[in-house]
Amino acid sequence: MNLVRAELERLSARRFVQLMVVLLLAAFAVTAATTLAGSHRPTADEMSRAQAQAAEQRSSMEAAHDRCLRIKAGTLAPDVNDYVPGDCSEIDPVRMERVPVAADFLSGVFTFANQARPLLYFLVAFLMLFGFLVGASYIGADLNSGGVVNLLLWRPRRWAVLGAKLGTLLGGLLVLSAAASAAYLAVFWLIGQTAGLPGRLDGEFWRSLGGTYGRGLVLVLLAAALGFAIATLGRHTSAALGTVAAYLVVWELGARLVLQIVGAARPDQWMLSSYVGAWLTGEARFWDSRACLGDTSGFCDNMYTLSWAPGLAVLLGLTVALVVAAFAAFRRRDLI
Amino acid sequence: MSAVIEIDGLRKTFHTLRHGRRVAVDGFDLLVEAGQVHGFLGPNGSGKTTTLRALLGLVRADGGRMSVLGARSPERLPEVSGRVGAIVESPQFFGNFTARRTLRLLAVAGGVPTSRVDEVLEQVGLSDRGDERVKGYSLGMKQRLAVASALLKSPELLILDEPANGLDPAGIREMRDLMRSLSAAGVTVLLSSHILAEIQLICDHVTIISRGRRVAAGRVDEVLAGFDQHEWQVRVAEPERAAELLRTLGLAVTAHPDHLVVAGVEEPELISRTLGEEGLWVRELVPLRPDLESVFLELTGTMPHPVVPRQVDGSVRPDAGPDDVVIDLDARENREVGA
């Protein structure tokens, strides 16, 4: 416990951590200020016009669905403008995840229900970067400067020292990320209430947003643990940065290109970014050039889905493997 | 006296892709007993720091046995780490922290009362500068802070690697006084240093390492006595005649431009009486005692050559044979390590 207390103080006193927190607050402030400046509360006239447009859009969607059913039933001849999918339920407004609402037709009005998720994605991306960099530099700088040696002279238990560092990092990051995300969403909710529109904030919305929030926090922790583990293995902060840069350029860009050129099936399933997307959004759909080979049903969109479960399994598996390797290497390493 | 540090047959080889295999410590032995101020000497790259790091669990030994305060190292080191204060080479501290905060964090991490912080800052002469950031410290001040961190635990055993590194003459004197006062208070000190005169002044025992092996160990005065050739510097009016007379007694005499050096003389009266009886009056009769520096240079083969620059790995490597230890005045028979 004493070790964790000392580590927490060291972590919070690091200049890099303080700089990243300032950047986080700055990004937070700029986003909120520009949103506030670019939004206004809609007038009654704007509102009624938008509602009318939304209603018109919805009725035209219902009409298209209706026409589809009648064309399928043979009671109506299709014309050139008709979109007739294999299954009419595909364009059934009732089955759609989201139908047009008045907010979609309001210009210069911030609608919290529409914007909360993209805003949260931005914050999660920032916090992932924050976690990775802080995780890598926290141990990397200490290994390089002799800080770890100093600590081991006091507590000659390597796993306890490294574990206290990782635990403090993840604990501190979790508290900071959870608080920052909650504050961030609260500010935009307030902007929606006072200078825009709250939108449709029903139970389903909050459940879904809460899920994204939780999954985002998990991603932030995984990124931090990855940075920490790679820097421990490489004995330097730059080892983590170099590994990620190399992975992005060589694999995510280079290998993706090669896989596409050779016509490999489902190249996205070999990319970590696909699993990050699948985990964060709940599921991600990707193009598969061979998915429709031999399909005779007439309804095949060449897409396949990665759900959150394999996303979590891959990301967690990779992180755990690297953290275990880092602890094993640190236990045997000569600290010279 | 009880053994505080025992190292028996320590071996460590480093393997790197670029430089291949390098033997750092090759069957090294060390014995430090309670209450000693023990100097640990060796040329650069001789294995001093590797030995200390292995003893403190920072480097994995390939072979040999080590114990600290009776606990096997590194396996049982955590059991006694609270009683051991150590600095290895020049420790780095977090530059943005003040000395006081640095020590307080170490105290918190080690479960030491934070009231000790002010005491050790006072002890190492940093109490007035304790609230300044470490990054503004000179090398000597950082060294003082390092020693303060080692003292924080009120250790029974203090292991200091080059504590005088970067200190000014006054700082070196203060460090010497500090070591003496700690020793007087019952603290056992193992001190690695290149400043041989300091070691001779501070330490009562010494171990010398060269190319990873022990070449001498024991009480400082006894180690020096082992190299005493009982030489005397003689100034006399007729040096040629004086040399002739002394040689007739079977003494080895070396003539220098303004003096003679006579070796193998236990009692100086022999010289003064022999010359006086022949009417040669001695103007100066000075014993030539070996100092630690000359012994060190001789044992390690690092005597500077006026033409050939000495290489780091050019020191003497003692043979590996069990009987080939050059001097071992204090080794104990059948000692048990890590009991």
Image (tube, helix red, strand yellow):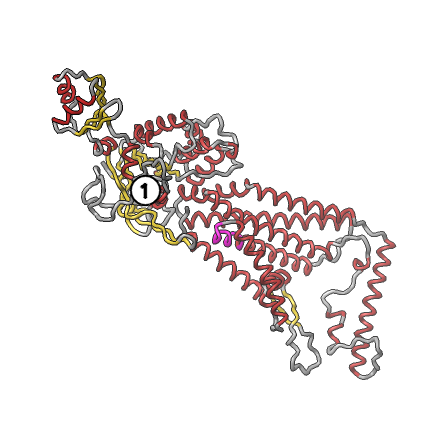
- Residue nearest the viewer, comparing B139 with A176: B139
At which x and y percent is residue A292? Answer: 66, 78
Q: Is residue B187 left or right of residue B134?
A: left
Query: Residue at 20% of width from left, 41% of height from top?
Result: B332
Q: How would you classify the magenta stretch by its main secondary structure?
A: helix
Query: Residue at 18% of width from left, 24% of height from top?
Result: B243
- Does residue A12 appear anywhere in the picture? yes
Would you identify the image quadrant in which residue B189 lies? top left
Q: Quadrant of the N terminus of chain B?
A: top left
At which x and y percent is residue A290? Answer: 64, 76
Q: Chain of mark 1?
A: B
Task: From the image, tell me which residue sits under label 1.
Answer: B315
Q: Is residue A233 magenta?
A: yes
- Specify the amino acid type for callout 1: Ser
Near mark 1 (Cα within 10 A), the count class, few <14, some 14-19 or many ≥20, is many
Q: Secondary structure at mark 1?
A: loop
- Residue nearest the viewer, comparing B47 with A320: B47
Query: Residue at 52% of width from left, 30% of height from top?
Result: B132
Q: Is residue B166 left or right of residue B201?
A: right
Residue reaching furthest right?
A45
Q: Is residue A82 left or right of residue B121?
A: right
Please, is residue A59 above or below residue B98 in the view? below
At which x and y percent is residue A100? Answer: 78, 63
Would you identify the image quadrant in which residue B220 lies? top left
- Does residue A331 appear anywhere in the picture? no
**Residue bounds of the magenta highlight:** A226-235
Please, is residue B335 above or below residue A122 in the view? above
Q: Is residue A88 magenta?
A: no
- Residue nearest the viewer, comparing A79 with A174: A79
Please, is residue A213 above or below residue A12 in the view? below
Would you identify the image quadrant in which residue B175 lies? top left
